[in-house]
Image (tube, rainbow, N blue to C red):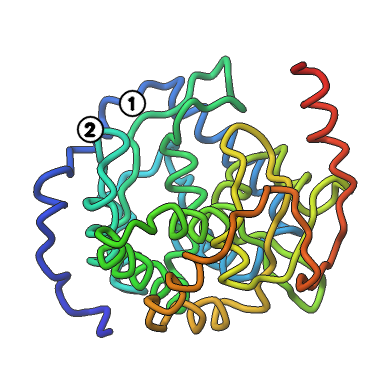
Amino acid sequence: MNVHAPLAPCKSEAEFAIDQDWAGYSADGHRVWSTLYERQCDLLAPRACDAFLKGLGALDLNSGGIPEFAAINPKLESLTGWRVIAVPGLIPDAAFFDLLAHRRFPAARFIRDPRALDYLSEPDIFHDVFGHVPMLTDPVFADYMQAYGEGGLRALGLDHLRHLARLYWYTVEFGLMRSASGLKIYGAGIASSAAETVFALEDPSPNRIAFDMLRVMRTRYRIDDFQQSYFVIPSLDALLEATLQDFAPVYATLEAAHDLAPDAVTPGDEVLTRGTQAYAGAKGAAAQ
């Protein structure tokens, strides 16, 4: 893709994009952003993958508190052709896939309450922009996200959205990557969370399993707490290569395969860490 070419028209952008209203953010909102930004930068410096850290440096996401999309988009477009747009909240699957397929990343414009820095009922601007956008400066990951959107549009009528959602969850949101210096974070759900940044890499509780696309797409996930398993890619190039294929045979295989529990370990897994599941067990016991 020529990233200097104008972005193609996108029907969903016209339908769902809203004004960010950057001038409407309060001083408290900007302080929340800066507090979260500085905390996560300290935590991620030794833990995030090189592509994420390079993206943070390229975009300068904390020059004046909450970043203004109009300011960061020219930098992002010049690197990979992507642009961030504000949306009113959760949007339909078809619109989400359409936006990704046209290199638009939909982001919430609200910022979390300063009294609840680590609680989110739904993703806010810090999760969406700090967590996701740095990776979109990487050409390979940028291509992966576009390919995911295109695949989602094709999957809409095939009754496999749950499988495709698991792929997004365990890569874009909660993915880990191998590196010469150990496992690193690239998933936004980890990168935007202080507690999960440490848990995903250092806690003995979760499984850490080598990425296999079919395995990932069979695996249920936790939406309300830390993950019980994380999947580890060897590289961004390998992740993209796994996605650039005809998914029809993949879906046919999944039709005959049963779902796996979030903590499952199967005989075919390459297990990097066999988790104790102590965290999930304690939470389950406390809830009973």
Q: Is residue 75 left or right of residue 49?
A: left
Front one among 4 and 57: 4
- Residue at horizontal 47%, vertical 65%? 255
Contact between marks 1 and 2 (CB within 8 A): the answer is: yes
Q: Say above or below: 137 vs 132.
A: below
- Residue at horizontal 33%, vertical 69%? 151
Name the kind of residue labelled 2 in the image: Asp
Disc tally is: 2
- Residue at horizontal 52%, vertical 66%? 256
Q: In the rendering, at what x and y percent does residue 139 appear?
A: 43, 78
Residue 74 can be seen, yes or no: no
Q: Which mark, residue 21?
A: 2
Q: Is residue 209 left or right of residue 104?
A: right
Q: Is residue 125 left or right of residue 224?
A: left
- Write down the residue under mark 1: 25
Q: Say above or below: 76 vs 261.
A: below
Callout 1 secondary element: loop
Label 1 to label 2, Cα distance in Å? Answer: 8 Å
Name the kind of residue labelled 1 in the image: Tyr
Q: In the rendering, at what x and y percent does residue 288 appear?
A: 77, 16
* Within-10-Å neighbours for mark 1: few <14, some 14–19, many 20+: some
